[in-house]
Image (spheres, rainbow, N blue to C red):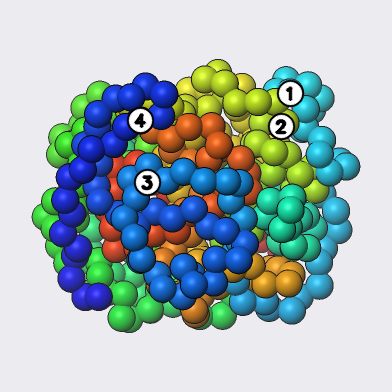
C-alpha cells in the first residue's frame, strides 16, 4: 500500500443520541481474544459504530526480559476518583502542551480479566495530554519529510524504529501534510490558521504521521502494553484510568457529537497523571494487531500483522469502550476524525 487511501462518507448513529454524523469509512473491529483470523486478515470489514462484548486479544513479540517489581497497590484498587493518593500529576513536568508524566515500570495483567496475560514494562514517560493542534502546528511549520531510518525506536525492542518503506506512506510536503489533516469536515480539529481549537486533540493523523511526529519531538509511540499499564494504574489493575467507578461525563468525554479541549476533565486523571486516556480520541500505539502471546515482558508486535492497535475509546462512542483493557485495530494509513495520539519517552537510567 503505497498511496493514500480514499475515504467515503457514511452515516453514523452516535450512541443514545441517535445523531446523524459524517464519518470516515474504516475498518474498526472489536478485538477478541481468539480473533486470529481477523488479526491475520487485516482490514476485513467496514464499521463506523462497532458493537460487541468486552474486548480482549492482543499483540506482540516477546523480548524475553524478566518482569520488574510490582508498582502500586493491590490489583483492583483505585476506587472512585479523589479517593487516596494514587491519581496525581506530581511526577509530571514540562510546559502545558508538552507535559510528560513519569511512570514507574512493573508487572501487571494485560488485557481483560477473562483473557489477561502476565506482562511487565520498564519505567517510561507518557504525555499527559493527547497531542494538541497547537503542539502539532510547530511540526507542520518545520516539516521536512520522513524521519531518519530507525528514528522513534523503543530502545528495548529491535526493529521498532522508522522504516525506509514507510516514507512513501507519509505526506511528501508540508502542503500534502496539511491536506491530509482535513479528513472529516465534522470532526477534524486542524485549522490552517490558529483558531478556537488550538487546545483540542489533533485528529486526522495517520499512524505514520503520528509516528513521525513523536520521533521529531524526541519521543516515540507507546507500546500497547505501556499504554494499558498507564491506563490501568499498573498493578492497581483499575477498570478505568480514574479507578473502578462507572464512567460519567465528569470523568471522560464519550457519547458526544464532537471533541472538546484536552485535559478538561481532571477528575478522570489516571494514576500516573495522564488525562483523557479514556474517551476524547482513539490513540495510536506502536503495535501491529495480533492476539496476545502467553506473556508480554517488555514486548511489542512490530513484525506480524497489517492493522495497528488503537486504544482509549473516543468521544462519539459509548462507555463500553472506555475500559483500560479495551482495544481496536485499523489500517495505519487511514486519517480519521476521531483518532489522535500521544507520545512516550523511555526514562533515563
Which quadrant of the figure contains the C terminus? Answer: bottom right
Q: Residue furthest left?
A: 175
Q: Secondary structure at mark 2?
A: loop
Report, in whole angstroms, how far the alpha carbon at label 4 lies from the one at label 1: 27 Å
Which residue, given by chain and number where applicable, does mark 2 sit on? Answer: 243
Could you say where residue 318 lies in the image, as x and y percent from the top left? 48, 32
Which residue, given by chain and number where applicable, does mark 1 sit on? Answer: 80
Report, in whole angstroms, how far the alpha carbon at label 3 lies from the one at label 2: 24 Å
Q: Secondary structure at mark 4?
A: loop
Q: From the viewer's perspective, is residue 293 above or below residue 217? A: below
Which residue, given by chain and number where applicable, does mark 3 sit on? Answer: 339
Residue at image coords 34%, 60%: 45
Residue at image coords 61%, 40%: 323
Give neighbour class at mark 2: few <14, some 14-19, many 20+ (Cα, 10 Å): many
Q: Are marks 1 and 2 in contact (CB under 8 Å)?
A: yes
Q: Earlier in the sequence, mark 2 or mark 4?
A: 4
Along the line of sight, the residue nearer the viewer: 98 or 9: 9
Q: From the viewer's perspective, is residue 250 above or below residue 75? A: above
Amino acid at each position: 500500500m503505497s498511496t493514500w487511501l480514499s475515504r467515503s462518507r457514511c452515516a453514523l448513529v452516535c450512541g443514545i443520541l441517535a445523531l446523524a454524523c459524517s464519518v470516515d469509512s474504516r475498518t474498526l473491529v472489536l478485538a477478541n481474544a481468539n480473533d486470529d483470523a481477523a488479526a491475520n486478515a487485516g482490514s476485513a470489514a467496514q464499521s463506523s459504530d462497532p458493537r460487541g462484548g468486552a474486548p480482549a486479544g492482543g499483540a506482540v513479540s516477546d523480548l524475553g526480559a524478566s518482569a520488574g517489581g510490582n508498582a502500586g497497590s493491590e490489583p483492583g484498587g483505585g476506587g472512585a476518583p479523589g479517593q487516596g493518593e494514587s491519581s496525581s500529576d506530581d511526577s509530571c513536568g514540562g510546559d502545558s502542551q508538552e507535559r510528560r508524566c513519569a511512570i514507574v515500570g512493573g508487572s501487571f495483567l494485560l488485557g481483560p480479566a477473562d483473557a489477561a496475560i502476565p506482562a511487565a514494562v520498564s519505567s517510561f514517560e507518557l504525555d499527559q495530554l493527547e497531542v494538541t493542534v497547537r503542539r502539532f502546528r510547530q511540526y507542520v511549520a518545520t516539516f521536512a519529510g520522513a524521519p531518519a531510518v530507525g528514528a522513534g525506536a523503543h530502545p528495548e525492542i529491535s526493529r521498532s524504529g522508522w522504516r525506509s518503506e514507510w516514507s512513501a506512506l507519509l505526506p511528501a510536503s508540508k502542503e500534502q501534510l496539511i491536506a491530509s489533516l482535513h479528513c472529516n469536515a465534522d470532526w477534524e480539529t486542524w485549522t490552517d490558521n490558529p483558531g478556537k481549537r488550538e487546545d483540542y486533540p489533533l485528529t486526522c493523523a495517520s499512524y505514520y504521521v503520528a509516528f513521525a511526529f513523536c520521533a521529531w519531538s524526541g519521543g516515540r509511540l507507546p507500546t500497547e502494553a505501556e499504554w494499558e499499564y498507564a491506563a490501568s494504574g499498573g498493578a492497581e489493575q483499575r477498570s478505568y484510568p480514574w479507578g473502578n467507578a462507572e464512567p460519567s461525563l465528569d470523568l471522560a468525554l464519550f457519547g458526544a457529537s464532537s471533541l472538546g479541549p484536552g485535559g478538561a476533565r481532571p477528575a478522570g486523571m489516571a494514576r500516573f497523571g495522564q488525562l483523557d486516556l479514556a474517551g476524547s480520541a482513539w490513540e495510536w500505539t506502536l503495535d501491529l494487531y495480533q492476539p496476545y502471546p502467553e506473556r508480554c515482558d517488555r514486548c511489542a508486535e512490530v513484525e506480524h500483522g497489517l492493522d495497528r492497535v488503537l486504544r482509549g475509546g473516543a468521544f462519539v462512542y459509548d462507555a463500553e469502550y472506555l475500559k483500560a483493557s479495551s482495544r481496536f485495530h485499523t489500517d495505519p494509513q487511514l486519517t480519521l476524525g476521531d483518532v489522535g495520539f500521544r507520545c512516550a519517552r523511555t526514562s533515563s537510567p
